[in-house]
Amino acid sequence: MARNKLMSINEALDLINDGDEIAIGGMSFHRNPMSMAIAIVKSNKRDLALVDREPGLAFDLLTISGRVKRIRAAMVTFEHFGIAPGFRRMVEGGEVEFVEDVCEGVMAGLRAGAYGLPFMPSAIALDSDLVPLNVKRGIWKVTKDPFNDQELVVVKAIRPDVALVHVHKADERGDVEIYGPKYEDLLKIQAARKAIVTAEEIVSEDYFRDHPERLTIPGFMVTAVVHSPRGAWPTSMYGYYKADYEIIKKYFDSVKAGLSIEKVLEVFTHG
Amino acid sequence: MADMDNVIKCMARQLRDGDIAYTGLASVPAVLAVALARHWGVNTWFINVAEIYEPEDFIITPSSGDPYSLINGRGFVISLDAFDLARRGQLDVMFFSAAQVDRRGNMNLSVIGNYEKPRVRLPGGAAAAYLYRRARRIVMWLREHSRRTLVERVDFITAPGPTKQGPHLTICTPKAMLEFDHVSGELVLTGLFSGVNIDEVINNMAFKPRVREPLSMLEPVTDEELQFLGRLDPSGVRYL
């Protein structure tokens, strides 16, 4: 019988150590692990690093929290609202180090991590100015294809300490269902040393026996399960609720106006 | 009628029957271009960063990654699979925008100014440093036809322009259309919106492009097309 992994958000927070690299689930304004991100902002964690391909709200909020020293992503955008406001402020001000990656680089790095391989070849264009930068940072390398001697960029495996992913359903064993878009969330969970899932619904053990095709992630990959209804709000949860763009706009304006993190958090108090 | 509607029409004109097209984040004009082409009867496959495969209808929101914005899909195709498709050379059309594009077709979505101490930290190029070279055809839109966006040399090469081997690059602006010429290795002017004077186009660029004669006359959106775009995007996200 598998261990019961259901715990409170504060117990899950204890699984995160200072200095950890955290992979953030979801994308843009969709299926972000908001409840966990807010809990981290309110905690006393320090020197965290974040990694994601095309992050949005949760990532930006963590970036301005003072708990994060380094972020890695391919694009940090608030889409048609503008450049992600916290990201822009913290990176322009030199308060957070930004490791600018490419979708291809984050995907290749997560794949290497998930596949248990040291690195992954990629199709990143050799003439991009990002190549010398990321070679210098030690996350990419230009090497030769051993079969045809052509140069290519390889990406070092990403092995986050923790993956934070918000899901639709989970049971106490950690078996998980994500409905609809998955982004790179499976790779993140596979590549990470610990996976914390927050779930809209905790289902009985019969759920996956009755609907075996709905299993997205087997429980042995999951470290902790937190029951967190509306845990993605104000980002969307496909099948459950839409993104609340009014709240997201309020966040955008508050951060742009330079409000304190305490004031910014008030944006999220009416979920 | 706003400039962006014409830009969207120019983008939609680049799509052909049988194309597999992908749209990314912050790309509402690209989603609308696909929708408009389909409205004309162009039979494209459509995959996207929202991961909704072959949506039947669209309700534009501030996020082109919004799965609720793409209605009645036939399933989910994740971006990992879409990008693998491109790496195999099977993605026909990818859409991009940029803060700067230069004579050589290099694009910048990283910084304005110095990289370490930027005047503006831009969001980053997302898939550009890979897909801008790996899709078969690139359709780019610029909201502004100006010396600020069409520069002699980008401040930072987020993604390098095409090579002589490809891909094909078309840029739609509110005034004109530019295409990458694989012989000269430069952008050339290939189309003008009716009523726009060629000097006005060239004087608003920081480099002087060659002109490919005869220039095609780009048609502005019709009332019917405008109505169609307005139904999908009633709050006008495309103008933001």
Image (cartoon, helix red, strand yellow):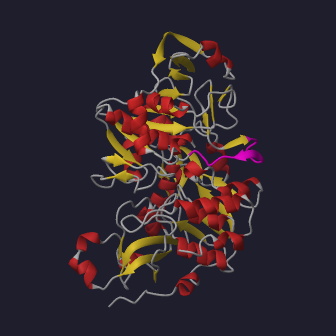
Q: Is residue B116 visible?
A: yes
**Does residue A100 appear left or right of residue A231 in this picture?**
right
Note whether A265 is above or below B161 in the view shown: below
Residue A163's x, y, as percent? Answer: 51, 70
Q: Is residue A74 visible?
A: no
**Residue B33 in the figure: left or right of residue B203:** left
Looking at the picture, tell me which residue is in the foreground, A234 or A186.
A234
In which quadrant will I find the N terminus of chain A?
A: bottom left
User: In the image, residue B17 lies at what x, y percent?
Assistant: 29, 30
Image position of B208 with respect to A167: above or below: above
Identify the residue at image location x=45%, y=78%.
A229
Quarter-of-image position of residue A240: bottom left
Residue at horizontal 63 percent and vertical 55 percent from the top: A84
Q: Main secondary structure of the magenta part?
A: loop
Q: Residue at x 24, y 74 (%)?
A: A212
Residue drawn at x 38%, y 59% as measured from the top left: A181
| Residue A168 among those drawn in magenta | no
- The residue segment tinted magenta is B113-125
Query: In the image shown, does A196 or A63 lie closer to the viewer?
Result: A63
